[in-house]
Image (cartoon, rainbow, N blue to C red):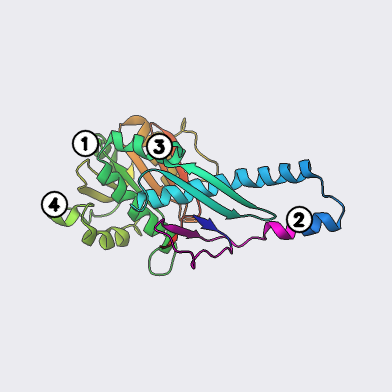
Amino acid sequence: MVAGELNFEEIRTGIPIYYTSIHPKSLIDHLVSVEKEGKGNVKELIGQLSQEASGNVEQLQNAVAVEYVLGELDSGLVVGVVEAKDSSSIIVHSLEENPLIKAIRECEERTSPEVVNAALKIAFDIAIAGREGKKVGAAFVIGDTEEVLKRSHQMILNPYAGQTEADRNILDRKNWESVKEFAQLDGIFVVDEEGKIHAAGRYLDVDAKSVEIEKGLGGRHVSAAAITRDTVAIAVTVSESGGVLRVYKDGKESICIDSIQPCKKCM
């Protein structure tokens, strides 16, 4: 996995190479500048490189988690070559130790892995592309459907009322465009463990006073976290403002993936 202006496209290998989007300076620029300024202290340089590398690890974890959800990566090691502001780093990263992937797998134990995966993929699409050129937020509450419906009501007419099971199955890709279209409505989607969408435009009737989430997030996130505290459902949300994807479980944020962007792949 390569981030920066490094180019590996001419390398012949059977190992998949993924390119992420980042455009910082290279290590050689930093080495030249510190030498000119008489700051060629090895300990100082190592400290700075370590600090920048630690930030690169988080970026790599995000990218790996996205590729895992998209089905490109399943297990093994990822070697990251990352250019940062003043340095380049090589990071060896195990998918088994990725905290985001661990959290995704924990959610998959709560309900169907296929349903969780489908909801995350749709959420990625919404986060990246929005809808008709504008940013869109969304929330999917998955599992414990009966209890979720008891604790919510329709804000608008339910667009899925009267639809066949086939037409409201989130596991069928041909239904994803309609899901993304209805994501523009206020409210949340209610999805059962088998992937059937029971409602869209649903308002959650939950007491969110004691829920602790990141400051600045809106009512969609607060209520999504609260419903997972009161039921055994999980909630997937997309921020309208920044396209950040979050997953809530047991009333707490379990996953946060920022700057979502699938990597370009070449062999």
Tell me the distance, in whole angstroms, between the alpha carbons under discs 1 and 2. 61 Å
Earlier sequence position, callout 1 versus callout 2: 2
- Extent of the magenta region: 5-31
Q: Which amino acid does label 3 sit on?
A: Ala
Task: Give the Cα distance between marks 2 and 3.
Answer: 39 Å
Estimate the spatial distance between the alpha carbons at disc 1 and disc 3, rounded to whole Å.
Answer: 25 Å
Q: Which is closer to the viewer, label 4 or label 1?
A: 4
Q: Residue 165 carries which label?
A: 4
Task: Please name the residue shown 35% across and 34% down the image.
Answer: 106
**Element at badge 2?**
helix
When asked about the image quadrant of residue 32, the answer is bottom right
Where residue 31 is drawn, which disc sits there? 2
Amino acid type assigned to the residue bearing label 1 in the image: Glu
Question: Which residue is the site of mark 3?
Answer: 103
Amino acid type, callout 2: Leu
Mark 3 lies on a secondary structure that is helix
Q: Nearer the viewer, residue 58 or 201?
A: 58
Q: How crowded is mark 3: few (under 14 residues within 10 Å), some or many (20 or more)?
A: some
Closer to the eye: label 1 or 2? 2
- Residue 216 sits above or below residue 14 on the image: above
- Neighbour tally class for label 1: few under 14, some 14-19, many 20 plus, Cα within 10 Å: few
The C terminus lies in which quarter of the figure? Answer: bottom left
Calculate the distance from the C-alpha at mark 2 to the C-alpha at mark 4: 62 Å
